[in-house]
Image (cartoon, rainbow, N blue to C red):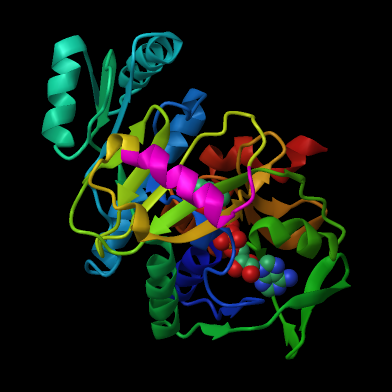
């Protein structure tokens, strides 16, 4: 997602761009993502919340630029909890986010149950203490969005090559000058490394250390179903949303517990959890179970910008890479072509780890 967005933005500004992808577009984490575009309650501190809000704004800008091709679903997001610690946390975080300018509303007790009945008529929420509705949020079919971005990148002259694995980088005077792939060698003025969990291996070819940590997540996808749910739904024991084509994607927050393998049995268990809230979800509609690796920097915040150790190598590695993709496409292009350092990216430079 990040590579496709940066390639599109660079090509649109007239740069000569070559995209090298070792498998096929969106083969990595992007195809295993929940793809919720959000700035909700875990997004802190304030600067990181702001970055995600900018991320949302740039999806709108990009949608307009591509004349509706991206088909982002802006139905918002709903979260709720029964009485207890989780409800108290949501109350506190929703309040703080409202103070930061997040367009969310929180309701309690009967009002919360009524809010859920209005937003999610097909959902049986169980016991409800608090519900929060975030109207500015959305979701996208990330695999489709990558196809759209690469199609438009090509329209502006980008060359998209796959399968083409970067296997070595050749440096001159401390800068990358040649990129070696199984299809031969390319010259470059600058190299953007947006290889997801493969970023550390590619950056290391130029002596640049990008520290990521393990952060897997399991999701299930169903076959296309009739409309069951509109906003992104964050129920206490399962998260789910429905694509425009009718497929439902669902997952859970493992909250630090061990993440299981993507077996069909585990997928069936996850389906049952989602069906607690969506009784109309047919058990036989389970289509795929996937285990994705989040692109998770050591301190969980984005890594973006030119590397001091190799000044023409630009790194873009981050979690919430769907939310931030449109913003990062714009931002990387500004930094690479205009030569500016964007102040809102300063907290996210690679050098913070050195
Ligand atoms: C379960 C789960 C749920 C998530 N939910 C959300 C969410 O709701 N909202 C959100 O914003 N984010 C979410 N994320 C995170 C988001 O999906 C990622 O941040 C984003 O997809 C990362 O995109 P990327 O382009 O950096 O990486 P990738 O999609 O992995 O792309 C990197 C590409 O580089 C290629 N590559 C690797 N090495 C090489 C090489 N040597 N040569 C050539 N090509 C190479 C790979 O094949 C791959 O296609 C979620 C992630 C997971 C796992």
Q: Is residue 340 above or below residue 148?
A: above
Q: Is residue 18 left or right of residue 102?
A: right
| Residue 100, x across and y down, in percent | 36, 21
Q: Which one is in front, 198 or 223?
A: 223
- The answer to whether any part of residue 217 appears in the image is yes
Region in magenta? 260-275
- State left or right for residue 32 relative to residue 128: right
Location of residue 331 with respect to 77 vertically, above or below = below
Q: Is residue 315 magenta?
A: no
Q: Quadrant of ligand 1?
A: bottom right
Task: Say whether residue 303 is left or right of residue 67.
Answer: right
Q: Nearer the viewer, residue 118 or 196?
A: 118
Quadrant of the rendering where the C terminus is positioned = top right
Q: Nearer the viewer, residue 287 or 320?
A: 287
The residue sitting at 57% across, 77% down in the picture is: 24
Residue 151, percent from left and from top:
40, 80
- Indicate whether residue 267 is drawn in magenta: yes
């Amino acid at each position: 997602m990040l590579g496709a967005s940066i390639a599109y933005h660079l090509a649109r500004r007239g740069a000569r761009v070559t995209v090298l992808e070792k498998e096929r577009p969106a083969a990595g984490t992007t195809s295993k993502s929940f793809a919720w575009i959000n700035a909700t309650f875990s997004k802190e501190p304030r600067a990181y919340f702001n970055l995600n809000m900018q991320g949302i704004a740039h999806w709108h800008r990009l949608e307009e630029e591509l004349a509706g091709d991206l088909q982002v679903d802006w139905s918002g997001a709903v979260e709720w909890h029964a009485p207890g610690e989780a409800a108290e946390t949501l109350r506190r975080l929703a309040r703080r986010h409202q103070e930061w300018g997040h367009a969310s509303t929180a309701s309690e007790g009967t009002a919360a149950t009524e809010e859920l009945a209005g937003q999610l008529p097909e959902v049986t929420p169980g016991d409800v203490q608090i519900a929060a509705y975030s109207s500015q949020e959305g979701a996208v079919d990330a695999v489709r969005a990558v196809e759209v971005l690469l199609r438009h990148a090509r329209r502006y002259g980008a060359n998209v090559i796959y399968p083409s694995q970067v296997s070595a980088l050749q440096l001159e005077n401390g800068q990358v000058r040649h990129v070696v792939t199984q299809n031969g060698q390319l010259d470059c003025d600058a190299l953007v490394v947006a290889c997801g969990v493969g970023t550390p291996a590619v950056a290391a070819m130029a002596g640049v250390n990008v520290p990521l940590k393990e952060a897997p997540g399991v999701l299930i996808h169903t076959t296309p179903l009739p409309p069951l749910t509109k906003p992104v739904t964050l129920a206490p024991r399962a998260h789910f949303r429905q694509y425009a084509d009718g497929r439902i994607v669902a997952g859970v927050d493992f909250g630090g517990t061990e993440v299981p393998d993507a077996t069909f049995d585990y997928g069936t268990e996850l389906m049952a959890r989602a069906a607690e809230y969506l009784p109309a979800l047919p058990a036989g509609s389970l289509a795929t179970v996937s285990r994705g690796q989040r692109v998770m920097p050591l301190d969980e915040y984005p890594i973006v910008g030119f590397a001091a150790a190799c000044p023409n190598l630009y790194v873009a590695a981050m979690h919430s890479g769907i939310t931030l993709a449109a913003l990062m496409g714009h931002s990387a292009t500004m930094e690479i072509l205009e030569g500016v350092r964007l102040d809102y990216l300063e907290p996210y430079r690679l050098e913070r780890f050195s």
